[in-house]
Amino acid sequence: MDPVTLVVGGAIALGGVLIGRMLPRRERRQPQQHQAPEVTAPPAGANPQPICGCGHHIVFHDQRSKLCQAQVVIPGRWTGQGSSDGVYRQCKCQGYRGPIPLDEYYAPDLLNGES
């Protein structure tokens, strides 16, 4: 290669880097995906709720088979349908994977109200 070609190629590469550095930063747009509801810590003093990894409460899971009985909306464009309306389908959760709630028992006072 001749030196003129190397200098021109280097100048083009350096110009591209400088232009890229001077342009304002753009945030990358992430494709919209179905995301599970964000699970946050309950406020202090509140009883924690038994929420499964699929985002549904324990009451939506069958007690024997542990399968989720809730309905979820699947957008039409993902199922190959032309309309933008969603389609209701069975939740794909194969079993309850959340915290097991403790049973509540009443214990009578042993001191009969005396301290």
Image (tube, grey):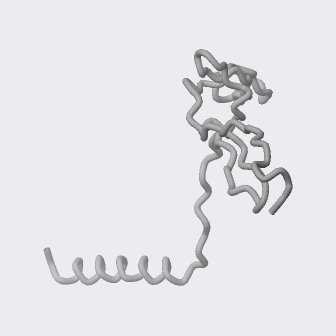
Q: Which corner quadrant of the image does residue 7 belong to?
A: bottom left
Kindly identify the residue that appears in the image at 68 percent across and 20 percent down.
90
Residue 92: % across, % down: 60, 24
Rendered-image quadrant of the C terminus: bottom right
Q: Which corner quadrant of the image does residue 46 belong to?
A: bottom right
Give the left or right position of residue 103, taking residue 106 as reference: left
Kindly identify the residue that appears in the image at 66 percent across and 38 percent down.
101
Residue 16: % across, % down: 43, 77
Q: Look at the picture and state if 104 lies above or below 81.
A: below
Kindly identify the residue that appears in the image at 68 percent across and 40 percent down.
50
In the current view of this chain or complex, which residue is farthest to the left?
1
Q: Look at the picture and state if 104 lies above or below 38.
A: above
- Numbered label tally: 0
Q: Look at the picture and state if 100 lies above or below 9.
A: above
Choose between 18 and 99: the one closer to the eye: 99
Choose between 64 and 74: the one closer to the eye: 64
Give the left or right position of residue 115, taking residue 5 as reference: right
Kindly identify the residue that appears in the image at 83 percent across and 50 percent down.
112
Residue 23: % across, % down: 57, 79
Q: Look at the picture and state if 49 lies above or below 5.
A: above
In the current view of this chain or complex, which residue is farthest to the right?
113
Residue 102: % across, % down: 66, 39
Choose between 93 and 96: the one closer to the eye: 96
Q: Which corner quadrant of the image does residue 100 belong to?
A: top right
Choose between 78 and 34: the one closer to the eye: 34
Rendered-image quadrant of the N terminus: bottom left
